[in-house]
Structures are given as C-alpha cells and as structure tokens.
Image (cartoon, grey):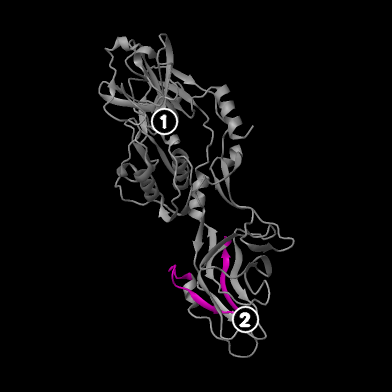
Amino acid sequence: MSIWPANKSGPPRLVTNLDVLKGIDDGFAWTLSPHGGCVKLVLRAMNQRLRLGPLDIVQLTINGTPWYYGTVPEPSHIEQPDVEEQVILGGREILKRALMDGKVYRNAGVYAIVRDILGRLCPPGVTYSAALIGDGTGTDTGPTLATFYSPTATLLDTLTGLAKSAGCIWDVDVLGRVFFRPANAAPLTVPYAGQRWQRLRVQGADACTQAVLRIASAPSLPGDGQLSPGYLPRTVTTTATHADHTLYGASQAVEPPEGVSVVRSQSLPPTVYTQLVGGTPPPVQTPENVSDGNPDSYAVVPIGYGWAVLLEQFAGRCVGFRMTYEVPQYNAASAWDLAVLVRRGSNIDAQVNLSTTNGRTTITAIVPPDASMDGATWPTTVGLETSVYANPPTPTISMWIYELTLLVVDDDAAQRVAESYLQPPYYQPTEVELRGLVPPRPQLTVTGSPDGDVTGETGAWEYQYTLDQYGVTLARLGSDGQDDEARAIRLAIRRGA
C-alpha cells in the first residue's frame, strides 16, 4: 500500500504485508464500479502506527497489481492506539474539492471539453491523460454541445453532467487516472462451479423506464420584455422510453445536468420587407449578415421606415432567440419604435422593446410556445419590426444587427441526456462468488447456475483479501449491493424528503 499526502508531493510511504508493526489487522475489503472506478476500501488498523492523515491518498497493490486508488476522508486520531476501521473513498472524491472556472464552451465536442477542463484544472491527486478521454486516440471531439457553462461547480458534478450529455461513463481508475468514454466494455462469461450463489431483493423503487426531460417551461425576457395577455407557456420536453416501459410504467420527470445546454442556435436566412406605403425608403443593407456566423459583420436597418427583418421557422422546436445589435442615440417616437416580436402562427407570444445602446449589446430570450400549441413541432417567427414615422430622421439614422438567431431544442443532446436516466429493474438480481480477484465488467453471464444461464448488468464488484483468503470476488447482477435502509435513505435524499 502506497500513501501520499493530499497534494501527492514527494515519494509515497510504503506499507507491505510484512509491516505488521504498522497495525493493519488482517487484510482489506474494497468495492469497484462495473467500469473499473474505485468506490470504497475498508481496512482495520491502529492509526498510531499506520499514520493516515486527512485527505491522504492511498493506492492498494496486491502481488504487483494495482487494485484500488482513493482518498482518506476521516482517519482515526493520529495517536489512536486501538484498532479501528479506516475508510478510503474512491479517487473521484478528490474531484469534489476542485471547482470549475468561468470558461464558456460553445459548439464544442464533449470529449474536447473534458480534455480542456482536466488539462487546466485537474487536481494533483489524480492523473489526466488525453488518451483516456473518448475513443483512445486523444484527439476525437465527441458529441457536440451548443453551450456548456458551469462556474463554481465541482469537477465531480461537471464530469457527471458531461457524461450524461454524451451517453458516457467516467470515473477514476485503480491507477488514479480519470477516464471518460463510451460504455463499450466487453462482457464476461464464467461457468458456475458450485460457488456461493445468492438471490437478492429486486430493486424497483428507483426504477425509471420513461424519462421526460424538461427543457424549457418558464419564459425569460430581457429588459423591456413583455408577454402577451393570456400567454401560458408550454413545457417543452424530450422523452426517452425503455422497451420495458409497457410492463413497468415507471416514469420520471428529470432536468438537464448543471451547465449542460440542450438548446442550440439555428441560423436562417432573413426575410426583409417594409410596412411603408408609398415612397422609396433607404434599403436594409446586407441583411444576410445577421445569420452569417461572423460576429463582426452586420446588417444596417434604417429607423423610421417600417422595416422588418424576420426569421421564419415553419416547423421546428424553437424556444427563443438571441440578438446582438447596436442602436445609436436618436429621438425615439415611442417605446416600441424598435421591437423584437415572437410570433406563433397569428399570435404574438412576446415582445422585447429595444432602446439606444452604449455600444454592442446582446440579448437572449426564452419563450416556449403557448400551452395551446399542439404537436411535436410548431411554427415560429422571430424578427425585428420598426415603426413608420411620418417624418423619418434626416439624415438617415440606422441600427446595426450583428446576429439574430433562433434558439431551438438540440434534439440529439436532449435525447442522450434523457436516456442516461433510464434504469429498468432487473428481474433476477443475484450475487455470485468468483474465485480469485477478477477485474470488473459491466455485464456478466454465469452459465450453468442454479437459475440456469443468467446474464445481467452488474452493479457492484466487492473484493476481499485476507491472510486466510488470498482473493475473493463477489459480483452482483442487477443490484448495487446496498441494504434496504441505505437504499431508503438514498431515495429520500434524491426525492427531497
């Protein structure tokens, strides 16, 4: 066993099986996740001799093979002469003590985001390798997220949310390395040979066979924004359904992880027209620049001539808009001289009035469709509309529009997040004892068992190594291994009880 201080500075202290004076009492018991993450290591020792300090880092190696890596949250008193239980939690706990900064990621691949975060912020207690993120090449970018921004979140919560957005798994392995990858490990098949076989209680209390992801339900308007009288926002959702949902009917409403956006921008060519009757107004110049993706190009819209610059989506899942613009100082005729309107069919759902700006300004509005709007998609028109003056300003005064884009549901990202919450119950949860120390796998098949050939997703892999037993593995199929009381507490916390 190797022991480092919390910052992992200097060489480790080594404790071997010959160091009986270190006070370790007969071996170790530890738990790994199905994908090789470290969960918990338990040993009994006199800390007066072992000298475990708070947040120390521990690696357990058996016969030259690393089997566990973690941190000590609450060791015994350093002068404790009695044998007490010492608990070492998995390396992912180290990432609870590191926080995200304020960097914003836009239109970036999830793997690229994770590499950038760990490359900049990975704490010294764990190790970052680009090749352990994604497919192993160290260069693949992964599924694209429109926006990721999660300042002050822990790195543990950050990686958990990003994993849900990409349909991936992540953890810290027995070498202290962070991995983040698709869940594609090969299954393990073992024959039953008379070893202990225990039927476990079915875990159905937290089953989820249909996850309804809430994407947008409440409008959010900038500045001088107004909702139309009678407007009632619809809750926009994405649903993931397991094949067994007709059997279990276990539905849950869920939220996107912190910092993960399931909304993206969509650029459309604008439609331009004027409400001015008669006369020849000065034209809108370069209207295509509102959607060209260049942050420094702009459309020029003369004020006072009734010009409208519209984005029209005839069938889609638009939930708002973003606009970057600049309005010079001028004598406005009314507060609604310049306004962005959100229309659904013949209805106006929201109006945002624009005033003069001190330079370039960006506004964002979330406006779900009205609850009366049926169907999986809906028409949306978003656009700048200007008033008609009896006497337009002379010389001409114009506003600039740098960007006008729709905000629409990112269906791929939303579907991945919703699917990550699915958790059907396993009908035949079982614990089987395997001889020796067997590396964990996410799926296990036991042939010729008392229940026949049994295949299932594994929930926990427990290991014991003592002076009398040189390695025993307990694999659980369809169970996380928690007792009824621990599971009830976990569910109560999750449900906010």
Image quadrant containing the C terminus:
top right
Q: How far apart are marks 1 and 2 (CA)?
A: 66 Å
Residue at image position (35%, 35%) is: 126
Q: Is residue 313 magenta?
A: yes
Q: How crowded is mark 2: few (under 14 residues within 10 Å), some or many (20 or more)?
A: many
- Which secondary structure, mark 1? loop
| Residue 434 vertical position relative to residue 398 in the rendered view, above or below | above
Q: According to the image, label 2 marks what residue?
A: 304
Depth check: give the residue in front, 78 or 31: 78
Nearer the observer: mark 1 or 2; the answer is 2
Depth check: give the residue in front, 497 or 137: 497
Image quadrant containing the N terminus:
top left
Residue at image position (41%, 49%) is: 110
Depth check: give the residue in front, 407 or 239: 407
Q: Which three-letter amino acid code belongs to the residue tagged 1?
A: Ser
Q: Residue 474 in the image: x percent, y percent?
A: 41, 22
Residue at image position (33%, 51%) is: 140
Q: Which mark is residue 177?
A: none
Q: Can residue 432 be seen in this view?
A: yes
Q: Is residue 46 visible?
A: no
| Residue 416 vertical position relative to residue 389 in the rendered view, above or below | above
Q: Which mark is residue 33?
A: 1
Q: Residue 157 in the image: x percent, y percent?
A: 47, 40
Name the N-terminal-most of marks 1 and 2: 1
| Residue 250 vertical position relative to residue 284 in the rendered view, above or below | above
- Which secondary structure, mark 2? loop
Q: Residue 431 in the image: x percent, y percent?
A: 45, 22
